[in-house]
Image: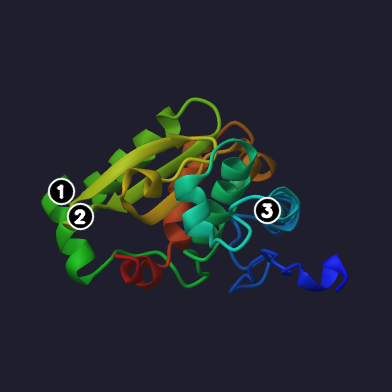
């Protein structure tokens, strides 16, 4: 049997966006979606598909790869997972505040939703270089904010990622240039808390 017949076709695919490219303006412009989703994320997908054949990750899912890999495979798998969580947490009808047990946990941890937002923004603006700011939950439901450099994800510390803001310059530079803090503030208007709540 020719070898190619036995090779499993295993390819990660670019996620579909649940909104139009211009739907998140002005927090995220159609031009930024074009580069960030259409070019950067597509490149991570292509890179991972080129890197995993012949490795132990050939049949692994993204979460497993992120938890168990390092080097180039981790960087590209992490960036795919992070961007999938990021792009699917937004909606043109987003904004407002969380509800239910997530809202209660935020209030219990930071005192109020406004205080949580301030802490999250401070973490995002204080992250030096490229990375991600996360709201994550422990197995006991305990919430925490963390800063992760480059492709980092709180999954690798056994936490469940709930919400993330991308602070790589490619996420905001076309729209906000050096004004990272202004961009992070604008993102609250498009966060779909119903989606975030399903992750908790
Ligand atoms: Mn990004």
- Residue found 34% across the figure and 65% down from its top: 96
- Residue found 31% across the figure and 68% down from its top: 197
Q: Is residue 81 above or below residue 18?
A: above
Q: Which residue is nearer to you in this view: 59 or 142?
A: 59
Q: Secondary structure at mark 3?
A: helix
The circle drawn on residue 106 is 2
The circle drawn on residue 63 is none
Q: Nearer the viewer's eye, disc 3 or disc 2?
A: 3
Give the spatial CA distance, label 3 vs label 2.
30 Å
Mark 3 — residue?
A: 41
Q: Which residue is nearer to you in this view: 63 or 188?
A: 63
Quadrant location, the C terminus: bottom left
Residue 184 placed where, x, y %? 47, 45
Q: Is residue 38 left or right of residue 170?
A: right
Q: Is residue 181 above or below residue 139?
A: above
Establish whether ligand 1 lies closer than 8 Å to the Cβ of label 3. yes
Q: Secondary structure at mark 1?
A: helix
Marks 3 and 2, the one that precedes in the sequence:
3
Quadrant location, the N terminus: bottom right
Residue 171 placed where, x, y %? 61, 45
Give the spatial CA distance, label 1 vs label 3.
33 Å
Establish whether ligand 1 lies closer than 8 Å to the Cβ of label 1. no
- The image quadrant that residue 20 belongs to is bottom right
CB-based contact (under 8 Å), mark 1 and mark 2: yes
Mark 1 — residue?
A: 109
Q: Is residue 14 left or right of residue 90?
A: right
Q: Residue furthest right?
A: 2
Could one spot residue 111 in this view of the protein?
A: no
Establish whether ligand 1 lies closer than 8 Å to the Cβ of label 2. no
């Amino acid at each position: 049997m020719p070898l190619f017949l036995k090779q499993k076709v295993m390819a990660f695919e670019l996620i579909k966006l649940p909104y139009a490219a211009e739907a998140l303006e002005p927090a995220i412009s159609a031009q930024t979606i074009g580069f960030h989703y259409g070019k950067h994320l597509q490149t991570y997908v292509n890179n991972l598909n080129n890197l995993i054949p012949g490795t132990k990750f050939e049949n692994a899912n993204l979460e497993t790869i992120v938890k168990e890999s390092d080097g180039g495979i981790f960087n590209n798998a992490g960036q795919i997972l992070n961007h999938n969580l990021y792009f699917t947490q937004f909606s043109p009808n987003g904004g407002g505040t969380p509800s239910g047990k997530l809202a209660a946990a935020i209030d219990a941890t930071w005192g109020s939703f406004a205080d949580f937002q301030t802490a999250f923004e401070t973490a995002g603006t204080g992250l030096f270089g490229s990375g991600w700011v996360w709201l994550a939950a422990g197995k006991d439901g305990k919430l925490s904010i963390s800063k992760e450099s480059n492709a980092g994800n709180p999954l690798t510390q056994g936490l469940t990622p709930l919400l993330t803001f991308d602070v790589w310059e490619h996420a905001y530079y076309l729209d906000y240039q050096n004004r990272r803090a202004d961009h992070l503030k604008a993102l609250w208007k498009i966060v779909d808390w119903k989606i975030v709540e399903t992750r908790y």
